[in-house]
Amino acid sequence: MMMMKNNSNGNSTTFTVHERLGAAIAPNANASYPSTTTCSINLSTSSNCQSITTVNNSNTNLMPAGSLSSATAASCNITTGNSNNNSTSNSSNQHQDLVNLFECPVCFDYALPPILQCQSGHIVCSQCRQKLSSCPTCRGPLGNIRNLGMEKVADTIVFPCKYQTNGCLSNLVHKHKLEHEDCCDFRPYMCPCPGASCKWQGSLENVMQHLWLAHKSITTLQGEDIVFLATDITLPGAVDWVMMQSCFGHHFMLVLEKQEQQFFAIVQLIGSRQQAEKFVYRLELNGSKRRLTWESTPKSIHDGIQQAILLSDCLVFDGATALLFSENGNLAINVTVSIG
């Protein structure tokens, strides 16, 4: 810690710094100081800080300290410690302060371009704007006023992923933020059971516990080669059959979904996309001199199965085909999981 003071006659006053005491005191020839390393700093009183005179242990040895002409006397700060670390910390804090200016007062996510404001200049994100009739900050009318200045600033900074509190460390430009969050591995997982009745969501580590507690009727079979038996496939309307398969230290969910006269069979991994890419599953229907097979990579429950079903990226067959392979209204599907 160092202090300086200018006398009225234009001369500078030198203060001695005691590192162990952490205090700056005026030099006193009669004082007795502890045996610690001391130094004194002599600053000139010109408008710009130009030079520093360093004195070690009362021996007057002058050492060049480089030019400080870029800093004015009013804002000249001299600090001890690692200046690079301090600079990085200050820069990070300033960036975070700037990012915080984009916080939406409604959802507390960030308002990204196009950024709309009220007549008083308060911003709100475009998603919340669609639900509002007045400014949530001042209650004034909301028009369609673009804040072009904020949009230009948004182009120059990066924003943290909205799942940062879940562990995501990604910082992205606003053009890539929404795309990243749609597939972020730290996004909460939805219940993988088909249908819309269960609204549970949580971390990947808690998915199986949820299934065991909330969906106790689901059967789990052990092994990489099992038979999935769907009973009463002639039931009318939309029907789902679900079974769990456990192998290779992972859990797989087997789903047979009936929509009108179409059947869709698929396997999804209770795991991430990266984990799912390591496996291959094979579905096979066997009948009298007939065989129908499908082989693919399991879907992660992070993505769900609805998009795959919509694109027919699974085993697809109609009701007539199902009857060809069924026996007494029951359909057996051989399921094999292997490491790809």
Image (spheres, rainbow, N blue to C red):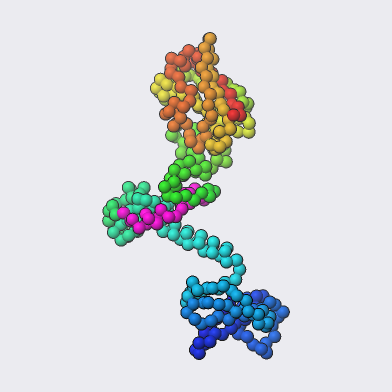
At a point 52% along the width and 64% down the height, the residue shown is 90
Residue extending furthest toward the right: 35
Please indicate, yes or no, whether residue 333 appears anywhere in the rendered image. no
At a point 53% along the width and 30% down the height, the residue shown is 298
Q: Position of residue 334 (x, y in %)?
A: 56, 20
At a point 46% along the width and 15% down the height, the residue shown is 321
Please indicate, yes or no, whether residue 149 appears anywhere in the rendered image. yes
Q: Position of residue 202 (x, y in %)?
A: 51, 42
In the picture, the quarter occupied by the C terminus is: top right
In the picture, the quarter occupied by the N terminus is: bottom right
Against 171, residue 45 (above or below) is below
196 vs 18, left or right, is left
At a point 48% along the width and 36% down the height, the residue shown is 303
98 vs 279, left or right, is left
Residue 17 vs residue 289, the one in the foreground: 17
Q: Position of residue 6 (x, y in %)?
A: 52, 84
Residue 121 vs residue 81, the one in the foreground: 81
Q: Position of residue 318 (x, y in %)?
A: 43, 18
In the rendered image, residue 152 lying in the magenta stretch gets the answer yes
**What is the magenta range?**
146-166
In the rendered image, residue 230 lying in the magenta stretch gets the answer no
Count of picture labels:
0
Against 292, residue 197 (above or below) is below
29 vs 323, left or right, is right
